[in-house]
Amino acid sequence: MAWVVDVNMGYGHSRAAYALRDLSGGQVLSANDYSGIPAGDRKLWKQSREVYETISRIKPVPIVGSFLFEALDHWQEIPKFYPRRDLSKPNLQLRQIYHHIKQGLGRHLVARLATHPVPLVTTFFLPAFAAEYYDYPGEIYCVTTDADVSRTWAPLDPKRSRIKYFASNGRVVERLKLYGVREENIFLTGFPLPKELIGGPKAQVLKRDLAARICRLDPKGIFAERYRRTLQAGLGQYRCEPPSHEPITLTYTVGGAGAQRHLATQILESLHGNIIRQEMRLILVAGPRPDIVAYFKESAIQMGLREQLGTWVQIPKFTSRYEYFSGFSEILKTTDILWTKPSELSFYTGLGLPIVIAPPIGSQEDFNRLWLQYVGGGIPQNDPKYTNEWLFDWIRSGGMARMAWSGYIEAPTHGTYRIEDIMLGVKSELPTLPLIV
């Protein structure tokens, strides 16, 4: 049993916590939005979230939007990794966070958790810092949620800290060392992915879904012809003969701030004919945001796709964040291509999902994009106005099938199981991850 704590700012931290929910019997506590949270704490958290989401939404606005976002991004910038050097000096953002903690931010939360001092795992750094500052009596773990992290993720005095980290990839391991975190406090686990999409240590569900996905993504059998033995060795009795002519399912999803909702309109317009001819099924995911759901529906109707709503154009509606994360897992089981900005969803290429990368928002997403291309699981979008041309070229050539396979082979898939094994004190039977990813 453990406490699983997130912050419901955006989706990244909550998505990781959702995957770890079994550790706490299915319950996730949000540090910025729980029953009984002091008014002062709630106000500080709310202001922080509103500033980020507002600036993210206005980033596309010429001059002003870019200026404001660049100022915010510089404040939380990730420094260049090379040359390797001591980066343990706290930055301004970290000092401000500790100022608020010393003023009482998080004290009520830690006192509440301390009434039942089981291990604490949080997917955001501030609850971990507060737990250590206010002497939480149990173990403290922190899950990183990007392919690289800023100095803000490491505590004020990292060499003396007892916070342990579950690193999403090898770069984060090395980065935390530069920040001064002791090596024995860093575990390379991979990002926690939903267990319902993996199916246990042997990844039975993942392999089944991936085999079917590769068939659909390789209509001419080009990839299968080249890698047949590899596919059979990795997926068992892989058969896809004759090549599949099933329609492709493309899922486009926006982040919590809804900053790239307008990209969906361009995708709809370009794929209009393919949807009408039932060559492509498009799922537009807005999360628990009824305003964006309404925007997507209105866009589809304006594109002449009213009759296709609910079948060939699906816009699921969720009433809560938990319902969204659960529903999103169901959507991904039949998704062939995921189109998203390089958020924490970049790690979902480990499920064998090829990712079309929308423009990044923020320094951390630049690093996620680089990592995603490095492992071969994703590629930046081409001009969305011509999606109907370049996307189908990538499919017919076997390129999307190749990305699905590369993501599955190169990116970590079992982060959730590794984290559970460490926290529960179970000797893991999973292979050690290579440091490079």
Image (cartoon, rainbow, N blue to C red):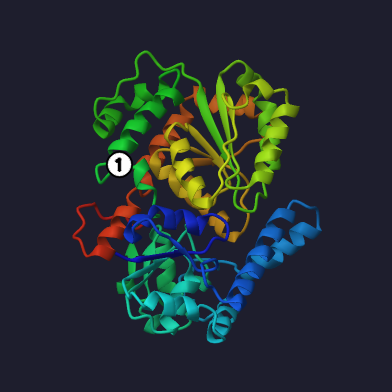
Residue depicted at x 40% and y 23%: 215
Residue 178 sits in quarter? bottom left
Whole-percent x, y for residue 371 in the image: 48, 51
Whole-percent x, y for residue 259 in the image: 67, 50
Q: Nearer the viewer, residue 404 or 351?
A: 351
Is 308 displayed left or right of 230 in the figure?
Answer: right
Quadrant location of the C terminus in the rendered image:
bottom left
* Direction top: furthest residue: 242
Residue depicted at x 29% and y 25%: 238
Residue depicted at x 66% and y 32%: 267
**Around disc 1, counting alpha carbons within 10 Å, would you say few (fewer than 14), some (14 to 19), or many (20 or more)?**
some
Is 295 located above or below residue 364 in the figure? above
Can residue 341 be spotted in the picture?
yes
Whole-percent x, y for residue 240 in the image: 34, 19
Residue depicted at x 63% and y 36%: 382
Q: Nearer the viewer, residue 55 or 88?
A: 55
* Direction front: furthest residue: 36
* Direction right: furthest residue: 63
Is 18 located above or below residue 328 in the figure? below
Q: Nearer the viewer, residue 213 or 141?
A: 141
Residue 176 sits in quarter? bottom left
Whole-percent x, y for residue 391 in the image: 58, 28
- Residue at image mark 1: 199
